Image (cartoon, rainbow, N blue to C red):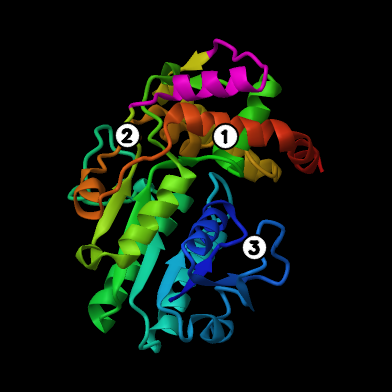
Amino acid sequence: MTSLVTGASGFLGGWLVRQLISRGESVRVLLRPESDRSRLAQEVEVCIGRLEDPSSLTAATTGVHYIYHCAALSTDWGPTAEFMRANVDGVENLLRAAHGNRELRRFVHVSSTDVYGYPRQVGDEEVASRACNLPYHRSKLLGERAIWRFAEQHGMPVTVVRPATIYGPHALSTVGEFARAIEADDFVWIAGGRPRAGLIYVEDVASAMVCAATSERALGRAYNLCDPRPTTWREYIEVLAAGIGARVGGLSLPGALAYGLAAASEVWARVVGKRRPLLTRHAVLLMARDQGYCSDRARRELGFESSVSFEEGMTRTLAWWNHRRAEFTESAAT
């Protein structure tokens, strides 16, 4: 069997490629010409293309049995047009390119629990997704809706996974950015760090995706992915800080105040043309609202279990960061 992985040079996609190869599968990856190939195994077949260029996707999607769409613009700040181009237009282009492949058995799309709109009380997959007017969130919501619409109209065999907060080695957002903020003494607690972080180790997400691709029961279904351990943001940040030999300050902002400050910071960043604001609404909602989404459906229908404990996951993550942080600190400064 041959699998196509988009986003293979990134965090989740890179781990998924490793897992597929370890299972003896043939792997094809879609890479931009400038993509970093340093983490890719030599066994992969490379197709050069861009999701925004439909003509470059035919060769990548032809003849594959599974498509794992991991590529996305995933950050808390950026131009709305860029989010839409990557997370909506890119999805639609890939779907259209894959439509002519009669050998395709499953299209697995990586969405996010962000599509629920950061509710005050989390639920399961039966809870309706809703807009909350943030660029990343809106683009992921529209991208997922494009998946369901295309499946209904054209019979595309799709499954959607909605991971919560993915962490692990090579996670620059959930590990690197926090670590740098802690080391610079710039980290501020939101809501005292009490909300659940909704963590899930990256290899567990990759395993769940493979299960979703090969399960008949998963056809046309969506699955939340979250470790059942109720790890709070305070637990996560304190373990991270201790592991990098730093201390976290005690300043904490209530969620509502932090959200207002973030909104003002975003406006100011646009006015003065700053690269990014000091604080974003996305980051505030991520840390002020419960991220501990129910993953019972994945356990029930896919047999999904978190195989890497929080303690082991953090041990592996810190070993990677402490070995590589100098180069990431240098790249962030340039």
For the point 54% across and 62% down, the residue is 81
Q: Which mark is on residue 112?
A: none
Measured Cα–Cα span from mark 3 to mark 1: 20 Å
For the point 33% across and 29% down, the residue is 229
Please give the residue where the numbered disc 1 appears in the rendered image.
316
Q: Image height check: is 227 above or below 186?
A: below
Image depth: mark 2 or mark 1 in front = 1
Please give the residue where the numbered disc 2 appears in the rendered image.
292
Measured Cα–Cα span from mark 2 to mark 3: 34 Å
For the point 66% across and 22% down, the residue is 244
Cβ–Cβ under 8 Å for marks 2 and 1:
no
Label 1 sits on a secondary structure element that is helix
Span of residues in magenta? 230-251
Please give the residue where the numbered disc 3 appears in the rendered image.
41
Label 3 sits on a secondary structure element that is loop
Residue 111: image quadrant is bottom left
Q: Is residue 232 left or right of residue 153?
A: right
Q: How dense is the environment of label 3, judged by Cα within 10 Å: few (below 14), some, or many (20 and up)?
A: few
Disc 2 marks which amino acid? Gly
